[in-house]
Amino acid sequence: MRATRALLMAAALCLPTAPVAAAPQSTKVARAQALYDLGVQAFKAKDFVKADEFFREAYKLDPSPVLLYNMARAAEEQGEGELAVRRYRLYLKNYPQAEDADQVRKRVRVMEKVLRKAKQGQLTVSGAPPGSRFLVNDEPMPEPGTRGWDLDPGEYAVRVEPTAGEPWEGRATVTTGQLAEVQYAVAGAAGPGLSALTVGKYTAAGAAVVAVGVGALFTARAIDNVDTYNDLTRAMAKPGADVEALQRDRLSAADDRDSNVTLSYVMYGVAGIAAAGAVTLFLLDADQGAEPQAWQLQVGPGAVGLSGRF
């Protein structure tokens, strides 16, 4: 999104337009303009909580649809993804003719995908015979592979139909960010319990996937910042342009771009570490002489590690 352009548009919409005789309305709009200006200052200072408060107060006085965009940006910068999506959608509903409507819709789609991924958990089946057919809530599924299926939280009925023998059925509860594993077992046989090593390997794999998704979101933001920077550069070349103001906005866009690029690199690095940890755990789990209960997965900021007896 071109946040700077949207803020400038909001300023234009917030200018008093009522007749001089309508003093109460003029005062109301002037107060909204003052609150908006404070919101812009707070946003540029990266005080997004305060910016959100000012924009919301301005919206109460003068419900300009473009202020909804500013409120959505403030919510997004605070990490309130669901709130940001609601505000973006209200902005599109109230201002369908917006110049950046298509870009806002694209941003909403990306954010919704990331939000849904963040809420999902994984479900896997271990011990199923090769070539088995899998169904989850009567829906055919591919083989779960090493990381299982990404599913929304809830209760699931799992059915395994081996190429030979009777079908097997089980149930599992999927929760956000967690791996649920069901153990295939023939009738009358007791399957082994879920080991800490098994949980660790799938958790690390899931963490790697989530980190890649978050890194992709920061990459998308950085691309947005580049577009804004280029637009401002072109605007500076136009006759009569306020070069000083545009240059300030351009430097702000460059700072945002650098921040988002750095954050994307950090998340990709976390994904790489988590993926390496997952691979290590899978290799250890393949060793039949290992003692899974002796291992513990250690997850910290930017790192995934393993502790236990060698």
Image (cartoon, helix red, strand yellow):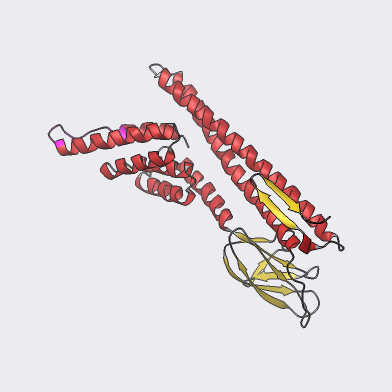
Picture quadrant where residue 141 is located: bottom right
Q: Is residue 182 visible?
A: yes
- Residue 20: quarter of image: top left
Residue 155 at x, y = what percent?
58, 70
Residue at 43% over, 39% down = 48
**Near-viewer residue (272 or 307):** 307
In the image, is 9 to the left or to the right of 162? left
Q: Name the spot of residue 64 as percent of width and height, x first.
A: 31, 41
Q: Residue at x 67, y 54 (%)?
A: 206
Q: Position of residue 237 (x, y in %)?
A: 46, 18
Visible in this render: residue 14?
no
Give the magenta range.
Answer: 12-23
Q: Position of residue 129 (x, y in %)?
A: 80, 70
Residue at the extreme front: 309
**Picture quarter with the C terminus:** bottom right
| Nearer to us in this view, 286 or 66 | 286
Q: Main secondary structure of the magenta part?
A: loop
Identify the residue shown where x is 67% and y is 68%.
140
Q: Is residue 86 above or below residue 250?
A: below
Q: Is residue 141 above or below residue 241?
A: below
